[in-house]
């Protein structure tokens, strides 16, 4: 597989707007009109459905992990460029006029693929900060 194809596939996989799709299908809402206006899991939680929010979180992590595991196994030299493209796809999805999420969940997936320990460390620190700084806004 050549570099250009890896870049394109990585970007398009990263650009799948799970938060937008799930809120549109199950809640009949456009998540971009809620809260911060982005399509990430945190904003999907603001839409009022924890299951959809957590599902978005998991899918946003997986859309980074799945292609990057493949790249790590078969094309290790392209791991970082593929990681960047997955991230840019999430933050700037072509499907939503280049207005996506902040990329936290996707970044966790990327970091887990690059270094599992650092990925878990980042996720734990982020979760602690999320819970303590947003305790009055969300009832997890």
Image: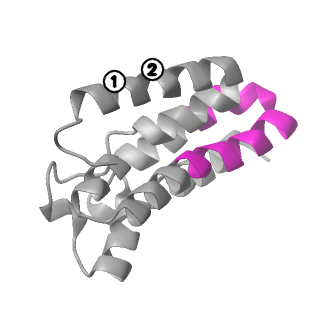
Residue range (magenta): 61-83
| For residue 134, above or below residue 16 | above
* Residue 48, quarter of the rendered image: bottom left
Which residue occupies 32% across, 71% down?
Answer: 23
User: In screen coordinates, is 5 left or right of 126?
Assistant: right
Q: Which residue is mark 1?
A: 129
What is the secondary structure assignment of the residue under circle 2? helix
Residue 17 pos. (x, y %): 41, 61
User: In screen coordinates, is 64 left or right of 31?
Assistant: right
Kindly indicate whether the residue at mark 1 contacts the one at mark 2 (C-beta within 8 angstroms). yes
Residue 99 pos. (x, y %): 26, 52
Q: Which residue is mark 2?
A: 125
| For residue 97, above or below residue 14 | below
Q: Nearer the viewer, residue 48 or 66?
A: 48
Query: Badge 1 local density, few (<14 within 10 Å), some, or many (20+)?
Result: few
Which residue occupies 39% across, 71% down?
Answer: 21
Distance CA(mark 2)–CA(mark 1)? 6 Å
Which residue occupies 53% across, 33% down?
Answer: 108
Residue 115, can we see it? no
């Amino acid at each position: 597989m050549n570099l250009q194809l890896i870049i394109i596939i990585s970007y398009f996989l990263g650009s799948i707007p799970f938060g937008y799709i799930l809120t549109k299908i199950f809640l009949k809402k456009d998540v971009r009109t809620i809260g911060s206006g982005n399509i990430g899991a945190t904003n999907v939680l603001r839409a009022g459905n924890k299951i959809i929010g957590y599902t978005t979180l998991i899918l946003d992590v997986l859309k980074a992990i799945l292609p990057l595991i493949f790249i790590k196994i078969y094309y290790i030299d392209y791991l970082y460029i593929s990681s960047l493209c997955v991230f840019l796809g999430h933050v700037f999805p072509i499907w939503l006029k280049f207005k996506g999420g902040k990329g936290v969940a996707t970044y966790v997936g990327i970091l887990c693929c690059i270094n599992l320990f650092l990925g878990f460390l980042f996720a734990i620190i982020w979760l602690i900060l999320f819970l303590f700084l947003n305790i009055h806004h969300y009832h997890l």
